[in-house]
Image (tube, rainbow, N blue to C red):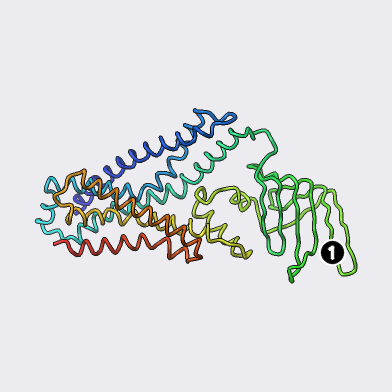
Amino acid sequence: MSILTGYLMRSILASTMLVLLVFLALAGLFEFIGQLGSTQGTFGIPQALLFAALRMPQLAFEMLPIAALIGALLGLGGLANNSELVVMRTAGLSIARLAGMVAIAGLVLTIFTGLVGEFIGPPLDYFARTMRDEARYEMEDRDIGNAAWVKDGASILHLERINAEFEFGALYLYRFNDDKSLKSIAKAENAGIDESDNWILENFRETRFKDDGVQVVESALAVESFNVDGDLLGITLVKPVSLSARGLMSYINYLKQNGLAAERYETEFWSRISKTATVMVMPVLALAFVFGSLRSAGSGGRLMIGVLIGLAYFLASEMLANSGQVFDLNPAIVTWLPSLALVMVTVFALSRVK
């Protein structure tokens, strides 16, 4: 059984990697062409090529569910054309045993997908976007960054500039009472976070509103302590697609603790989990089709079926994820619906195989 399992795994994995390489070649070309219209500053054709190359792992993560299905259809279809699957069945292997063997290949692809989606794709995607913005606007040596609003309990901070070194420029601080009334307004001409996650505020001036009047407090250097640290601020700079699952969970917890909307990040988190898990289902679904309606089909027919199913899965995933945010539906349920539908189709198709 271990020999047969290894043989099936090699067929599926080899076909999947080949399909993935073709997809990445096409996606990389389109990514490069898409960046040519954004050439500006020092962001030219070499930088556009580098940007497309750095985006490859993230694109691979997004394409792996479809690549796994098409690769498994082609790999298992080749075995079926050579009657190797028929010989395995004749030797006494049940469909359930074959499905279990094929699922091991799906498990290997799932682990690979999870590693790429968690540790390789997001950091390279963020680096690519940062590199592009710095090259386009020549920000390397300028004190320019992204402004941000951050809530910390009863306080709201407005940072005029966040850059990669976490230098914030001017900072505006608004404190509120329990009844949501304004307690004080403060401004620091420059702000930053030290190694102990303390906020260092230079030329700090705070206006406090009291029942009997207004009090102004000034300090050349003030130290404040907020629950917002450098790691969390770094997350605010990153698009959801460029965050790892750990970063998404951390930011979701922060948003919920401060009563802020977290649906966008929850949708991205659960969508990423469901896509990773779906990779394991795809080879088993391919097995059902190879033994069923595609038993006598050629590689072209299998390729077409794989593309159609993969496209339907992709469109359903994107449509449900966006609809969930619009209609305030549970992200965990909405993002898992396409994957559950594939599981049901797989079980039904396998049950009809004789």
- Looking at the picture, tell me which residue is in the foreground, 108 or 204: 204
Q: Residue furthest bottom?
A: 179
Q: Residue at x 17, y 55 (%)?
A: 291
Q: Residue at x 40, y 35 (%)?
A: 29
Q: Residue at x 46, y 45 (%)?
A: 121
Residue 6 drawn at (x, y percent): 23, 48
Residue 77 drawn at (x, y percent): 19, 47
Count of labels shown?
A: 1
**Would you place residue 151 above or below residue 162 in this image?**
below
Tell me the crowding category of disc 1: few under 14, some 14 to 19, or many 20 or more residues within 10 angstroms, Cα based. Answer: some
* Left or right of residue 38: residue 95: left
- Looking at the picture, tell me which residue is in the foreground, 256 or 193: 256
**Would you place residue 181 above or below residue 319 in this image?**
below
* Left or right of residue 9: residue 315: right
Q: Secondary structure at mark 1?
A: strand
Residue 41 drawn at (x, y percent): 60, 30
- Image quadrant holding the N terminus, namely bottom left
Q: Residue furthest right?
A: 212
**Would you place residue 333 above or below residue 237 in this image?**
below
* Left or right of residue 160: residue 136: left
Q: State the image quarter where residue 157 is shown.
A: bottom right
Q: Residue at x 43, y 63 (%)?
A: 334
- Image quadrant holding the C terminus, namely bottom left
- Looking at the picture, tell me which residue is in the foreground, 112 or 44: 44
Name the residue carrying label 1.
209
Residue 72 drawn at (x, y percent): 26, 49
Type of the residue with mark 1: Phe
